[in-house]
């Protein structure tokens, strides 16, 4: 399975390189975030786009996978950053206008960045897929904690979090609410560890005030080298930072019993196989961190309370079955999950334009806004929940 589109360009005047990879489409549409860093590569964007296809396929959501990458060599002020994002949007406008690519945020980009990009592309947000949501980190935290719960007991479990950004901090709060013990966190400025536990509320407060410097502002802990966090004797490791930070050079040093990623492609395939042979349970990243995709899509049809219930019940059951079959077949979970995701994706692809979705789209177009909450949402909710139940069967 090859990507449908690979596109790259360089703008010398503004000093940035841009990439867009459309890995797959359903009914001519794809979704994915925009990753910005000083080291992002085309190969990385390709793998991230494939990961989106796997997420949508595993959840049986009718959408193709994509990703955009933006490499800026310097850390820029807001004023200097805006024209770069705008130029990126103008260049990608032909792909955005028809919904071929529906962009969202990813590591290094914000909702403001996406707004600048969409304005430059002269396109309004596509309401059919609500890829943006203030609840996205929380949704991801919910799928992470429910994934980990199927692999081990959470009460008093020692948890280390690699990367304390939006996802890492949200996961810290949600795992703490399930009575897990956050014992170590890291940022690009270093790592801190206290085997008795760190104060999650204080960590989040310091992150809001100090950013990555929270590891220097927090006391009652010992400071450790950032990479040493992977080697701590913990029950659960949550990789929530960049790509491939767990690889063949450090996989044999990991002491965690369970790895539950919040980041996209944080482990190499070789590392996952090494961990599997060592008896360490590694939840596939496109499963454990699929909460933002699942929650934002369901937000068109269901309340936040219903979304949490579906993740707690239906999603948890799917992860339980995945780990159960993986153990029975003695195969590493990611390989099995990829088979399931690809099979489901092609089932959706085969049924493009299915009457049920066409009817739903027709209702959405035909009903005026005044009747949307009265008629459209209940109909959409009923139809969507039936599709979702099949996804987890």
Image (spheres, rainbow, N blue to C red):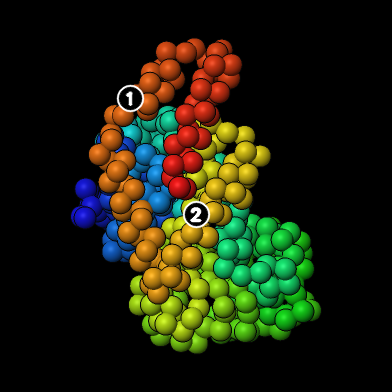
Tell which circle, 2 or 1, labels the residue nearer the N-terminal end: 2
In the picture shown, does residue 376 fall above or below 78?
A: above
Label placed on residue 355: 1
Return the residue found at the far bottom: 253
**Circle 2 is placed at which residue position?**
318
Element at badge 2? helix
Label 2, label 1: how far apart the Cα atoms are: 27 Å
| Vertical placement of residue 53 versus 162, above or below | above
Tell me the crowding category of disc 1: few under 14, some 14 to 19, or many 20 or more residues within 10 angstroms, Cα based: few
Q: Position of residue 165 (x, y in %)?
A: 59, 61
- Could you say where residue 186 lies in the image, as x and y percent from the top left? 60, 73
| Relative horizontal placement of residue 284, taking residue 303 as reference (left or right) | left
**Nearer to the camera, 381 or 204:** 381
Q: Quadrant of residue 217?
A: bottom right
Residue 139 drawn at (x, y percent)? 58, 49
Q: Position of residue 262 (x, y in %)?
A: 52, 62
Residue drawn at 47 percent across, 40 percent down: 388
Give the left or right position of residue 250, taking residue 375 as reference.
left
Residue 130 visible at all: no
Asked where in the image residue 347 lies, by quadrant, the reply is top left
Nearer to the camera, 275 or 230: 275
Looking at the rendered image, the quarter that the N terminus falls into is bottom left
Dot 2 crowding, Cα within 10 Å, few <14, some 14–19, many 20+: many
Foreground residue among 205 and 28 = 28
The image quarter containing residue 148 is bottom right
Can residue 270 be seen from the camera position used here? yes
Residue drawn at (23%, 52%) of the image: 3
Labels 2 and 1 touching (C-beta < 8 A):
no
Q: Residue at x 41, y 85 (%)?
A: 249
Q: Residue at x 45, y 71 (%)?
A: 327
Answer above or below: position of 34 versus 171: above
């Amino acid at each position: 399975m090859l990507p449908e589109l690979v596109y790259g360009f360089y703008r010398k005047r503004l000093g940035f390189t841009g990439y867009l990879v459309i890995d797959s489409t359903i009914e001519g549409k794809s979704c994915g975030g925009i990753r910005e860093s000083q080291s992002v590569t085309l190969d990385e964007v390709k793998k991230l786009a494939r990961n989106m296809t796997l997420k949508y396929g595993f959840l049986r959501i009718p959408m193709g996978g994509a990703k955009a990458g933006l490499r800026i060599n310097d850390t820029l002020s807001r004023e200097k950053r805006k024209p770069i994002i705008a130029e990126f949007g103008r260049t990608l406008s032909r792909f955005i206008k028809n919904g071929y690519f529906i962009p969202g945020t990813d590591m290094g980009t914000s909702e403001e960045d996406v707004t600048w990009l969409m304005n430059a592309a002269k396109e309004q947000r596509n309401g059919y897929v609500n890829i943006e949501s203030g609840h996205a980190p929380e949704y991801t935290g919910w799928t992470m904690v429910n994934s980990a719960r199927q692999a081990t007991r959470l009460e008093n479990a020692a948890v280390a979090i690699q990367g304390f950004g939006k996802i890492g901090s949200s996961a810290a709060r949600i795992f703490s609410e399930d009575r897990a013990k956050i014992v170590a966190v890291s940022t690009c400025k270093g790592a801190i560890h206290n085997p008795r536990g760190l104060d999650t509320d204080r960590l989040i407060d310091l992150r809001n005030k100090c950013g990555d410097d929270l590891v220097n502002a927090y006391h009652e802990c010992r400071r450790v080298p950032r990479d040493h966090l992977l080697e701590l004797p913990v029950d659960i490791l949550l990789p929530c930072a960049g790509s491939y930070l767990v690889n063949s050079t450090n996989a044999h040093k990991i002491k965690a019993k369970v790895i539950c990623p919040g980041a996209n492609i944080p482990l190499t395939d070789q590392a996952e196989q090494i961990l599997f042979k060592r008896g360490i349970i590694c939840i596939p990243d496109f499963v454990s961190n699929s909460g933002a995709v699942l929650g934002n899509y369901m937000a068109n049809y269901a309340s936040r309370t219903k979304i949490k219930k579906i993740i707690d019940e239906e999603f948890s059951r799917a992860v339980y079955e995945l780990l159960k079959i993986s153990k029975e077949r003695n195969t590493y979970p990611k390989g099995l999950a990829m088979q399931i995701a690809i099979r489901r994706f092609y089932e959706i692809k085969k049924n493009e334009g299915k009457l049920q979705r066409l009817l739903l789209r027709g209702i959405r177009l035909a009903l005026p806004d005044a009747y949307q909450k009265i008629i459209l949402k209940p109909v959409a909710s009923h139809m969507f929940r039936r599709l979702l139940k099949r996804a987890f069967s």
